[in-house]
Amino acid sequence: AGDMALQIGGQTAAFYAFRDREHVLNQLESASGGRFHPNFDRIGGLKDDLPKGWIDDTKAAMRRVREFCDEMDLLVTGNEIFETRTRGVGVIPADIALSYGMSGPNVRASNVDWDIRRDGGVRGLVYDQLDWKVITHPDGDSFARFWVRIQEIRESTYIVDQCLDGLPSGPIMAKVPRIVKVPEGEAYVETENPLGAMGYYVISKGDLGPFRLKIRTPSFNNISVVPWVLRGVYVPDIITILASLYFILGDVDR
């Protein structure tokens, strides 16, 4: 959210985003020791137990993130310049978005009510036990993509709060073999990440490592629509559209 405002000329919003991102990164670091790549999950459980006070501190961080979303609404969402630069700019209809394999906030901003957390049937997760909603917007333009992300950030804080309230006690790691072989066969599993659908397709011959592995990243498909959506637009609108699609280059390079 802050980055998109920055690309259009709103520096203040970016500084606010960097400031409040620290609250979340601090919680990741205090639990896992890492800020950018926490590497916390393990086969059979987790690397470590949570430190004392972590749940209360995380709830406080979620309150700060919600305050950040409110600030973005006041500073950016209703800003006349921002709305002029984003409304009606880079419109992607639902059928075009789906034909290019777009997912996540980008496709939901084109009024596609689809979220893998709700619709993907991923086993072992608790989304079906929580009270949350999928955010959509009917316009499919750059403003809609920004707006959906702000609302999803806010909704995510409520999801985190509910998970913290229902966090069970007990052991953090099951007994698993020191060497785990991938069973022979093939499987595809996808989950919803902040950019969209993240999937792994694995073919195994029963060895220590997979025979073939294909990673389906959301950014690659999301930016595949760029040649279509940039047809006939003004040059200043290019940066607006690219910022609204919000892709990560490392997520593209597969």
Image (spheres, helix red, strand yellow):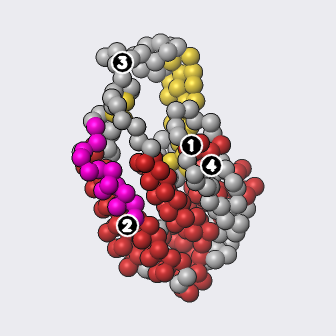
Mark pair 3, 2: CA separation? 38 Å
Earlier along the polypeptide chain: callout 1 or callout 3? 1
Q: Which residue is mark 2?
A: 64
Mark pair 4, 1: CA separation? 15 Å
Mark pair 4, 2: CA separation? 26 Å
The vertical placement of 227 against 52, above or below, is below
Relative horizontal placement of residue 179, taking residue 10 as reference (left or right): left
Q: Which residue is mark 4?
A: 115
Position of residue 22 measured from the top left corner of the image (x, y, whole percent): 30, 62
Q: Which amino acid, mark 2?
A: Arg
The vertical placement of 65 against 204, above or below, is below
Please name which of the two marks, 1 or 3, marks the residue nearer to the observer. 1
Judge the density around disc 2: few (<14), some (14-19), many (≥20) Cα neighbours within 10 Å: some
The vertical placement of 34 against 141, above or below, is above
Q: Which residue is mark 3?
A: 176
**Residue 68 falls within the magenta-colored stretch:** no
